[in-house]
Image: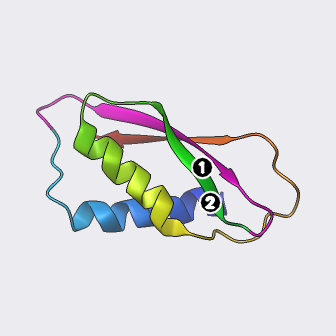
């Protein structure tokens, strides 16, 4: 979806500028929940499932907070949305 693409672009941008590195050969995963307001703003981002890598979790949340607006949704979205981020 367009929203996912916008958030992933911001995540990649922040990751490139950070010192974040994968710890070893395992994959690290975190899940976030957020809402999209009527004006297209990202609201209430939070960790739904934290990883074991706090720096990764913080950077993912920063990506959601940094996006701001993702465009007005074509219909009202009452339920929170969820995305999974992986670092390997």
Counting labels gives 2
* Visible residue check, residue 88: no
Residue ID for mark 2 = 42
- Who is closer to the viewer here, 5 or 76? 76
69 shown above or below 84: below
Judged from the image, the secondary structure of the residue bearing numbered disc 1 is strand
Which residue is at a point 24% across and 35% down the rendered structure image? 53
Q: Quadrant of residue 42?
A: bottom right
**Residue 33 painted magenta:** yes
Q: Is 11 positioned to the left or the right of 67 in the image?
A: left
Disc sitting over residue 44 in the figure = 1
Real-space Cα separation, disc 1 to disc 2, in angstroms: 7 Å
Q: Is 58 positioned to the left or the right of 68 in the image?
A: left
Q: Which residues make up the magenta segment? A: 23-39
- Who is closer to the viewer here, 5 or 79? 79
Q: What is the quadrant of the N terminus in the image?
A: bottom right
Q: Please rate how many residues cluster around mark 1, counting C-alpha atoms within 10 Å: few if below 14, some from 14 to 19, many from 20.
A: some
Location of residue 48 in the rendering, given as x and y in whole percent from the top left corner:
51, 31
Q: Quadrant of residue 16?
A: bottom left
Location of residue 83 in the rendering, given as x and y in whole percent from the top left corner:
54, 42
Judged from the image, the secondary structure of the residue bearing numbered disc 2 is strand
- Who is closer to the viewer here, 38 or 23? 38
Which residue is at a point 13% across and 36% down the rendered structure image? 23
């Amino acid at each position: 979806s367009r929203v996912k693409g916008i958030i992933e672009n911001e995540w990649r941008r922040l990751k490139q500028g950070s010192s974040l590195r994968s710890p070893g050969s395992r994959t690290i995963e975190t899940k976030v929940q957020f809402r999209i307001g009527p004006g297209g703003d990202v609201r209430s981002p939070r960790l739904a499932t934290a990883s074991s890598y706090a720096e990764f979790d913080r950077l993912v949340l920063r990506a959601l907070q940094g996006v701001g607006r993702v465009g007005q949704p074509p219909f009202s979205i009452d339920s929170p949305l969820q995305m999974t981020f992986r670092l390997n």
